[in-house]
Amino acid sequence: MILDTNPNRMELLRLKKRRVLAKRGHKLLKDKQDELMKQLLELVDKVKELRKKVDRELAKATGRYLFAKAGMGIEFLESAMLIPGIRIELTIEEKSTMGVKTPIFKVQTEGSIQNYGFAHTTGELDSSLLAIERVVEELIHLAEKEKKLQLMAEEIEKTRRRVNALEYILIPNLEDTIKYITMKLSEMERSNLTRLMKVKDIVRSR
């Protein structure tokens, strides 16, 4: 599609500069898209493995807890779990990856998850709670990776739209307009040349 413009040399020069910038921007965005896609695929594999690990550990921790619950009186279990003994603090920082701001979750814990006496509790309860504590840390790590995955996927989609807009709309329109202006300027030059020749013939005939 030809852009709405005046066919003159100044406009032709401006459009040629704009085409150079558009092609340069297209290459940079395409390189960014390719690199983001590469990192995304690597991250997908890591997230899959981490999710499998978390699911396995969570199933083990839950199984141990249910086993401990079955081996203890309900009143002793409720008493042991009544007062929380551990405090988890989550801080979020940001890291830039190819212009994409992704979160970094940092976990700080205080206290002990085993905040109970050992007279009426079992070793299975100790093992299950320690396993749950480890799983919580892995879950937070997984959440960080999945959020990064989501943000990178959104950025890839935005970049893809920009690349397509440049490749299929702006650059072709600029090239069509440059061809049109070049053709119009050539026609004007031929017309001027013909007019000058006629003037010259008139002057000679006198």
Image: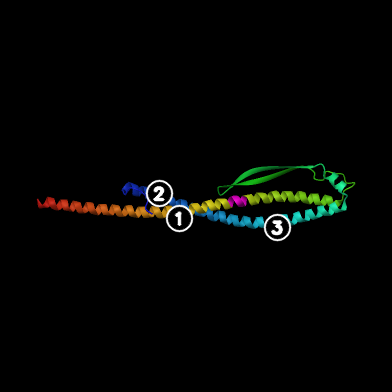
Q: What residue appears at the point 78 percent right and 43 percent down from the top-left corner?
A: 86
Q: Residues within 10 Å of mark 1 (few under 14, many from 20)?
A: some
- Residue assigned mark 2: 18
The image's mark for residue 28 is none
Predominant secondary structure, magenta span: helix
Q: What residue appears at the point 14 percent right and 53 percent down from the top-left corner?
A: 201
**Residue 102 at x, y = what percent?**
61, 47
Q: Earlier in the sequence, mark 3 or mark 2?
A: 2
In this view, 83 is above or below 151: above
Label 3 and label 2: CA atoms lie apart by: 50 Å
Which residue lies most toward the left here?
A: 206
Q: Is residue 68 left or right of residue 14?
A: right
Dividing the picture into quadrants, the one containing residue 55 is bottom right
Q: Secondary structure at mark 2?
A: helix
**Residue 119 at x, y = what percent?**
90, 46
- Residue assigned mark 1: 167
Q: Which region shows up in magenta?
A: 148-152
Label 2 and label 1: CA atoms lie apart by: 14 Å
Q: Earlier in the sequence, mark 2 or mark 1?
A: 2
**Residue 78 at x, y = what percent?**
84, 46
Q: Is residue 126 left or right of residue 148?
A: right
Q: Are marks 3 and 1 in contact (CB under 8 Å)?
A: no
The image's mark for residue 52 is 3
Q: Residues within 10 Å of mark 2 (few under 14, many from 20)?
A: some
Q: Are marks 3 and 2 in contact (CB under 8 Å)?
A: no
Residue situated in front as seen by the camera: 193 or 124: 124
**Residue 70 at x, y = what percent?**
86, 53
Q: Residues within 10 Å of mark 3 (few under 14, many from 20)?
A: few
Amino acid on which disc 1 is placed: Glu
Q: What residue appears at the point 63 percent right and 46 percent down from the top-left corner?
A: 103
Which residue lies most toward the right here?
A: 119
